[in-house]
Amino acid sequence: MNKIPHAVPTVSRRAFFRTGMAGVSAFYLEPMLRPVNVYATEKAKLRGAAEYCIFIFLNGGASQLDTFDLKEGRWTPPDFKVTTVKPGIVLPVGLFPNLAAQTDQVAFVRSVEAWESAHARAQYYLQVGHGFSPARRKEMPSMGAVIAYEMQAKRKDSDFLPPFVAMNFGNSQAGLVREGFLESKYGPLPLDMQQGNDFVVAPEEKNAFHRRWELLQRLNGEATTGKMPPIYGEFGGYGRSAFDMMNSPKIAEALALPAADRVRYGTSPLGDGCILARNLVAANAGTRFVMISHNGWDLHANMYDPKNKGNHYGLCRELDNAFSALIADLRKTQTPDGASLLDKTFIVCMGEFGRTGGDLSVNSGRDHNRFASTALFAGAGVKGGQILGATDPRGEKVIESGWGEKRSIYTEDVVATIYSQLGIDWTKKLTNTPSGRDFEYLEPMSGTEFMNFKEISPLFS
């Protein structure tokens, strides 16, 4: 019996050198099988209230008991100005004066646990919704890539923006999880707000830009005429997407950072990222998921020391300005159907885990704690002004889940809620992976047991 040959791309030596570094990564020379959706036996009931999601990632793990799950004690500085903003909601108004005035738009979930307490693994988990597997690290797509893949069918001919944008992950972007085995067009467009971007072509440079593009197409002619393996077509498609974005007359407006807005948002990389996120969703031109990394929350030492440039006060001030301005602008921006942009944008704000409670450590900081953290949610039907869950007096352990389940809320539940809001069935699987193992959007197997992960429905009641 003749065996069917395996579909492995082939490339001549001449073609390989012609395309330069395109083939360096052995992973991308794997068989480029297209993924196929497979539904679980029982589909999830989807909310579908949002068209966009903005995720503010508190990179390093914010201290829950010094922010949104305040535990007042001898460790609490007087200038926190601890205040009962409304019944049940106590906040350090000295740190969050602007957000304190908008608590009716925000739900505070204080019963979040993480599976990991090491930064790299926990941050991976937060982006993918799966535990880290060295064998599948390059295969697993991030949540943003899955959203981009699922939203592809909704793209309009006029869309010129990428579906997934990630900001402030640094020059190396080592912590940013990309598209995995999905096509490159579903991967993130990485932007660093401290570096600026080169996507807006100055009017006096447009003629030269078009000449260079035409020259590139001639040089890559063989790759664009179908004579090369499919992988090179993907690289060409990625370049075409970048060209379409840069060539759009609307790109300058979408990436604009007006000086007055920068001041209002706090004049910080987070603030600039939130302005850009606002612009991208307001443009309604293809972007569906934006993840903004707010860096510096790993405060093991000198947490309150004014000599520490990246101390707790500065980070809270940046978050307060940017988050509150984002909510305010989305609320006042009307869409063609008369709804506000906030009604169509689901906002999530959280870190990869929480911090230790009680008194500060001997280094005047707080260490990692996976057993308790707080997540904030707003927009797209979220009932603001409510608290879900509770922790012990030291803020270190969840003692009340607050959502009808006899367990804490985990990363998978947050991811399921994002998927549900965007109308994505989190019970799906993608087959035809390089490893041959199906990629489940959310696995029912946690690090220790089987669990029924689900959306956080009380957010919307």
Image (tube, grey):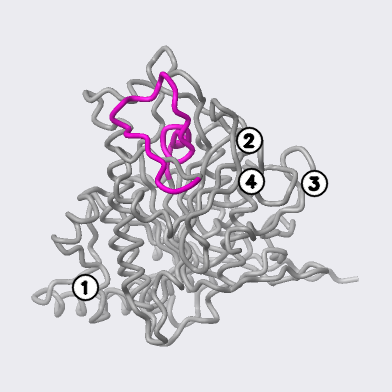
Q: Amino acid at mark 4?
A: Tyr
| Residue labelled with disc 3 | 450
Question: Measuring 44% from the left and 65% from the top, which residue is drawn there?
Answer: 164
**Residue 207 location (% of width, % of height):** 14, 80
Q: Report, in whole angstroms, how far the alpha carbon at label 1 lies from the one at label 3.
A: 48 Å
**Residue 397 location (% of width, % of height):** 61, 31
User: Quick check: 397 above or below 360?
Assistant: below
- The single residue placed furthest to the left in the displayed view is 204
Crowd rating for badge 3 (residues with CA inside 10 Å; few <14, some 14–19, many 20+)? few
Between tags 1 and 2, which lies in front? Answer: 2
Residue stretch in magenta: 58-87
| Residue labelled with disc 4 | 410
Question: Measuring 60% from the left and 35% from the top, which residue is drawn there?
Answer: 116
**Residue 392 location (% of width, % of height):** 60, 29
| Residue labelled with disc 1 | 252
Question: Measuring 20% from the left and 63% from the top, which residue is drawn there?
Answer: 257
Q: Amino acid at mark 2?
A: Val
Between tags 3 and 4, which lies in front? Answer: 4
Q: Report, in whole angstroms, how far the alpha carbon at label 1 lies from the one at label 4.
A: 39 Å
Name which of mark 4 and mark 2 comes first in the sequence.
2
* CB atoms of marks 1 and 3 within 8 Å: no
Between tags 1 and 3, which lies in front? Answer: 3
Q: Secondary structure at mark 1?
A: helix
**Residue 81 within the magenta-colored segment of the rendering:** yes
Q: Amino acid at mark 1?
A: Ala
* CB atoms of marks 1 and 2 within 8 Å: no
